[in-house]
Image (cartoon, rainbow, N blue to C red):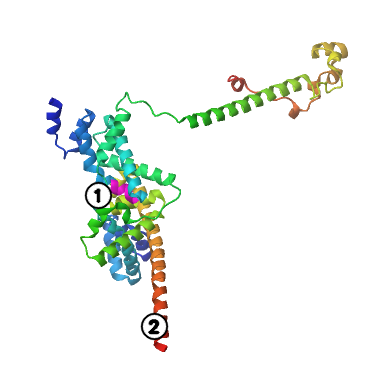
Amino acid sequence: MKCTQVLKHIHLLVGGDLPEETARQSRDHLKACLGCYREYQDVLRAHESLRTLRQKPDLSALLVGLSDDVLAELREAPLGPSAPLPRMPFSRILRFSAAAAVLLMIVSASFFLGQTSGLRANRGLDDAGTYRSGYSANENPGSPGEAREAFGPSDLREVDPLHRLEPQQLPRVQPASHRRGF
Amino acid sequence: MNNVTESAMVDYHDDAEIIRHCQQNDQRAYTALVEKYQDRAFWVAYNMVGNAEEARDVIQEAFVRVFRAIQRFDFNMSFYTWLYRIVSNLSIDHLRKMKRRRPVRLDDLGDKASEFAEQVSPSARLEVSEIKREVHEVLDKLPPHYKNVIVLRDIEGLSCKEIAAVTGASHPTVRWRLHTARKLFKEKWDRQQSRTARKAALPARDSSRGETDLERE
């Protein structure tokens, strides 16, 4: 076994947490390699310090009445299926409700704005409520079919505002599944 | 009356028997279970949170949780694994809540700990308690998950497989955590030791300098 391999798992070796065969090979290496052996001694020293905590003092005085305290706490909230579910603190309920209300407002506002801008785009209205083609609402000649009859197919672009919009300006229609929730 | 007679006959060495009585809401069985495991649970919690009072609170909460879920206890698993899991998780939660970490002192354990210390000679006692304090200080600097593995393996003496059952991690993960935890501990321990050695050397150098000055005078 090489030095790098031994040093790689030296921390497991000191605690006896290596498989038997690997541990045996590592020990053989340590017998032959002074550098690794010194490192092992260093690691072992730190590990031994940890093991001093294995000695437990007599804790009985500290733990007097623990079972009574546990039983008293259990009596306050009974056992079994009849035990009430832990309640969420009121402050947390309040915070959740406020967050939910804000979220709902944002979602409904964005939906409302999306709808109105979509309607405006559909009708060719700008923000001031006038037609982008320069017609006012009263001068609207009617449906594209009527316009076609009045001006002919070549003039349709002059009448139907949707025909004048570039494809990227056309309102995006959301799929039905997105709107179903509202 | 019948219930009392039955509970008096319970074999309190057998966990399964005690748990069956707990499931029948036998108060004596509850007490027996707490008294059987309170020391071990406390020692794990104490080495994790580093304060006797908080460790007591942690194990009290752990036992309450155990008894609330005792009806669902799986008899295929060992009770102490389950208890250690709850104690470990509560201790880790507690450590996370306590952003400010206090230095740990053995005095926290009160008079009983000193009684234990009186069994050895005063100088050895001082040395042992000093080492323990330093070990606790170093342990306190480790991240909770690594600390938990070290406490369970090197202090409590659980095997890697048992730790895997307690933590819910796989056996290789536990070994990897243990390796990293010991490596971290060693690095911090070495740093602490060199700091202590420097501190010890400073007054010695000052006093020796003082002596030479006196000698010169």
Residue receiving disc 2: B211
Q: Chain of mark 2?
A: B
Secondary structure, mark 1, is loop
In the image, is residue B91 above or below residue A116? below
Mark 2 crowdedness (10 Å alpha carbons): few <14, some 14-19, many ≥20: few
Residue receiving disc 1: A59
> Residue B46 in magenta?
yes
Q: Are marks 2 and 1 in contact (CB under 8 Å)?
A: no
**Percent x, y of residue A63:** 26, 45
In the image, is residue A59 above or below residue B3? below
Q: Chain of mark 1?
A: A
> Would you say the magenta stretch is mainly helix, strand or loop?
helix
Name the image quarter holding residue A2.
bottom left
Q: Residue at x 37, y 51 (%)?
A: B147
Question: Which tag is nearer the camera, tag 2 or tag 1?
Answer: 2
Question: Seen in the image, is A164 located left or right of residue B46?
Answer: right
Q: Nearer the viewer, residue A60 or A177?
A: A60
Secondary structure, mark 2, is helix
Question: Seen in the image, is B8 located left or right of residue A87?
Answer: left
Q: Is residue B78 visible?
A: no
Q: Which residues are magenta?
A: B42-47
**Percent x, y of residue A177:** 59, 21
Q: Is residue A174 visible?
A: yes
Question: Seen in the image, is B2 located left or right of residue B185?
Answer: left
- Give the amino acid at mark 2: Glu
> Residue A173 in magenta?
no
Q: Residue at x 23, y 56 (%)?
A: B115
